[in-house]
Image: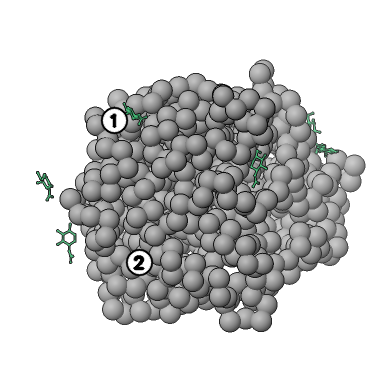
């Protein structure tokens, strides 16, 4: 380590005569945890090319929180005064100072001006460098990593440096320490289940697929049977969600956004099966397509409105691994908000499924976030996000989608990372993006994961080796983006065994455990301070700082919850499956907010937008869940309790109360 650093230093002095020798360098980012499942393979060849990207610090970003709180706090005069997109872009664009300082550093380091490209968004600089140049520039060493299961490659270093005076102008640089690659399970998860501490067990990899098991004889729309089979009617009964008249005139453009990452893809035939059995009035789902008028005898099946991002498409392959998440999300989202539309953001082509990330989606709804759309990465040694046009055979040949789609007013995503997978700077930049979309009036929902305190994959952190372990001991792992204070994080509940829909639910304890805990990155947002303070005071958790950051200063999650057990879903040509998970809870809660928005639009109000401050200020808008826990890491996890708790948050939606509140505020 010391030797190679010395070598880099010598190289440095040879090539950078013009580089001011008094520039002090500091570590900008260092990876804290060994990347899960990756093996360091070999040193990168020095002549290989890396597509380097610098995420520039944005102006005014330190005031982002107060801007957002001002328009999202119920009693503020500016409540609901959402910003225009142009105002957001102008306000947060990097300053001229920042652009100049970073350019001067690169020029002094021998990266000629002509090599540095600005992306369409002002927030990024791009340039190609050899590994040798990059190692000198960032005073680091690059290695090729290989995934132990899939064999896929990834280029990374352990830490990197920048001149001290430049540091405040940079969020982060890629490719460096980040492992933002999505690992796709390459085998049938039913045969490779691994038992874990009582709760979480299931497929390996992310996105985490909700647990699926076949059901013999689900009873249709039977409210007496909801503790065994959850259907849209059960959810309506639990939360007081109305069924809108199928012929109702709806507000154009009020659509519920659901995000899916390829190879996840819904099966249209399964949607039809599901709607024909579980929609009270099947015809309602055939009502909005214009061709019904032309040819009334063949009803046209209702489908989500597809917004393809970077080649995302419906591949129509029946496959349990590939349809589960999409079928679940869409069957429930569409049934619950009907006759409102559901917009499906389908992200990524079928070739680069490993690399499509949340950034690819965020790029498509905010061009000012977009790092670029030209092909700079070497796919055989990929770095961070999927790249488009896709240079691989059969890949999507179009440009990376930068700002090509509008954001719907509610967007639900049932995919997640471990907070330790990414770096604080990287996560902060993405989290700020959710805040900006909140300024625009969008509500972002993320599921809180299905392993209780054991993150998004049922693994925990061994503090002695800084590695993930088997999930039976060690430090709790928070789930990202749930720990970002600008998303609404959704945990899971269930109906008690044999109980009716009118009895209080408990934290989900069947097959999965509601993800919950405290961030190691994001400080406690102001809107949570009362709720967290009283939880720590009244129900102090029995864990030391070695398990989680118990300073009472960090963001707690989830914010709220909804049923996540025994959802009846049509899969594989119409067989009924039971699905479990916060994956189910997120679209259910998102449907509720979409219906609230519809009611507000009907009386001339705007969408609720960033909703967290309102919910924390008015916890009676939710049904408090007080029973259950979220075990993991060899512990009982946290306990559900009166008021907010890190298992079920503030509780499940109470639609009638929410409606009353949001129609009068
Ligand atoms: C891209 O990766 C391949 C395989 O690792 C390598 O042979 C090739 O030289 C790389 N190309 C560039 C431009 O780095
Ligand atoms: C980097 O190199 C690739 C492949 O030669 C090229 O397509 C791309 O435009 C270059 N990017 C920059 C920022 O110069
Ligand atoms: C719903 O989507 C369909 C198909 O995209 C469209 O024709 C219809 O106008 C949309 N309805 C509303 C209310 O937005
Ligand atoms: C990105 O794509 C758009 C078209 O979608 C094109 O106008 C623009 O020039 C592209 N930018 C780069 C840097 O390739
Ligand atoms: C919590 O729920 C469990 C499972 O139904 C039940 O056995 C227990 O009595 C409940 N506890 C409380 C305090 O209601
Ligand atoms: C639920 O009801 C069934 C059938 O009545 C019974 O066999 C079972 O023991 C009950 N389970 C619980 C947890 O009460
Ligand atoms: C916990 O968070 C506090 C506040 O951010 C921080 O000062 C402290 O270092 C953290 N503790 C650990 C063990 O990381
Ligand atoms: C729909 O209902 C019919 C009749 O009860 C049943 O035979 C079929 O299995 C159900 N299919 C689905 C997908 O629920």
Q: Residue at horizontal 83%, vertical 58%?
A: 99
Across and down, in percent, residue 298 comes to 56, 24
Q: Which residue in the protein does label 1 denote?
A: 214
Measured Cα–Cα span from mark 2 to mark 1 = 30 Å
Q: Residue at horizontal 67%, vertical 50%?
A: 253
Residue 623: give its label.
2
Given residues 405 and 203, the one toward you in this image is 405
Quadrant of the snapshot with the C terminus: bottom right
Across and down, in percent, residue 586 comes to 45, 51
Across and down, in percent, residue 95 comes to 82, 64
Given residues 275 and 66, the one toward you in this image is 275
Query: Left of 121 or right of it: where is 264?
Result: left
Query: Left of 12 or right of it: where is 224?
Result: left
Across and down, in percent, residue 138 comes to 68, 49
Vertical placement of residue 267 versus 127, above or below: above
Query: Left of 142 or right of it: where is 33?
Result: left
């Amino acid at each position: 380590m010391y030797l190679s650093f010395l070598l880099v230093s010598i190289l440095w002095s040879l090539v950078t005569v013009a580089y001011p020798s008094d520039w002090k360098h500091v570590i900008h980012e260092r990876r804290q945890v060994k990347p899960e499942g990756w093996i360091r393979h070999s040193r990168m060849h020095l002549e290989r090319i890396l597509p380097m990207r610098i995420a520039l610090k944005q102006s005014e970003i330190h005031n982002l929180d107060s801007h957002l709180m001002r328009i999202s706090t119920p009693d503020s005069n500016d409540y609901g005064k959402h910003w225009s997109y142009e105002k957001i872009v102008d306000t947060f664009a990097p300053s001229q100072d920042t652009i100049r300082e970073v350019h001067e550093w690169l020029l002094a380091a021998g990266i000629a001006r002509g090599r540095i490209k600005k992306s369409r968004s002002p927030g990024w600089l791009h340039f190609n460098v050899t590994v040798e140049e990059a190692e000198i520039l960032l005073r680091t060493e690059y290695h090729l990593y290989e995934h132990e299961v899939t064999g896929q490659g990834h280029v990374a270093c352990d830490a990197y440096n920048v001149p001290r005076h430049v540091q405040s102008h940079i969020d982060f640089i890629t490719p460096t320490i980040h492992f933002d690659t999505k690992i796709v399970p390459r085998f049938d998860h039913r045969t490779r289940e691994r038992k874990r501490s009582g709760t979480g067990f299931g497929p390996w990899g992310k996105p985490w697929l909700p647990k699926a098991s076949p059901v013999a004889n689900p009873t249709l729309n039977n409210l007496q049977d909801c503790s065994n089979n959850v259907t849209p009617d059960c959810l309506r009964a639990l939360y007081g969600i109305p069924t809108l008249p199928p012929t109702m005139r709806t507000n154009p453009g009020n659509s519920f956004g659901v995000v899916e990452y390829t190879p996840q893809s819904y099966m249209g035939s399964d949607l039809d099966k599901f709607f024909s059995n579980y929609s009270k009035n099947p015809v309602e789902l055939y009502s909005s397509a214009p061709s019904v008028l032309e040819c009334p005898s063949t009803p046209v099946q209702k489908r989500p409105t597809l917004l393809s991002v970077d080649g995302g498409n419906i591949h129509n392959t029946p496959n349990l691994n590939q349809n589960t998440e999409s079928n679940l999300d869409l069957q429930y989202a569409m049934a619950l908000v009907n006759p409102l539309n559901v917009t499906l953001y389908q992200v990524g082509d079928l070739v680069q499924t490993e690399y499509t990330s949340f950034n690819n989606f965020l790029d498509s709804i905010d061009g000012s976030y977009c790092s670029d759309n030209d092909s700079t990465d070497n796919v055989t040694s990929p770095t961070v996000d999927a790249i488009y046009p896709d240079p691989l055979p059969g890949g999507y040949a179009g440009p990376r989608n930068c700002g090509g789609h509008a954001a719907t007013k509610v967007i639900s995503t049932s995919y997640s990372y471990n907070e330790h997978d990414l770096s604080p700077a990287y996560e902060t930049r993405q989290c700020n993006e959710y805040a900006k979309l909140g300024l625009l009036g969008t509500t972002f929902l993320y599921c809180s994961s299905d392993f209780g305190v054991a993150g998004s994959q049922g693994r925990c952190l061994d503090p002695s080796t800084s590695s993930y372990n088997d999930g039976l001991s060690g430090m709790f792992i928070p789930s990202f983006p749930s720990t970002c204070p600008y998303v609404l994080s959704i945990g899971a509940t269930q109906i008690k065994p044999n109980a009716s829909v009118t009895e209080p639910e408990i934290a989900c304890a069947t097959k999965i455990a509601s993800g919950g805990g405290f961030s190691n990155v994001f400080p406690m947002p102001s809107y949570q301070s009362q709720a967290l303070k009283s939880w720590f005071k009244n129900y102090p958790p029995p864990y030391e700082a070695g398990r989680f950051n118990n300073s009472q200063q960090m963001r707690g999650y989830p914010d709220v919850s909804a049923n996540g057990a025994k959802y009846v879903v049509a899969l594989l040509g119409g067989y009924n499956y039971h699905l479990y998970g916060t994956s189910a809870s997120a679209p259910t809660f998102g449907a509720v907010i979409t219906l609230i928005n519809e009611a507000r639009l009907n009386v001339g109000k705007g969408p609720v937008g960033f909703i967290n401050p309102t919910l924390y200020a008015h916890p009676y808008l939710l049904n408090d869940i007080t029973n259950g826990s979220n075990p993991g890491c060899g512990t009982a996890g946290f306990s559900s309790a009166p008021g907010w708790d890190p298992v079920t948050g503030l509780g499940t939606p109470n639609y009638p109360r929410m409606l009353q509140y949001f129609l009068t505020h």
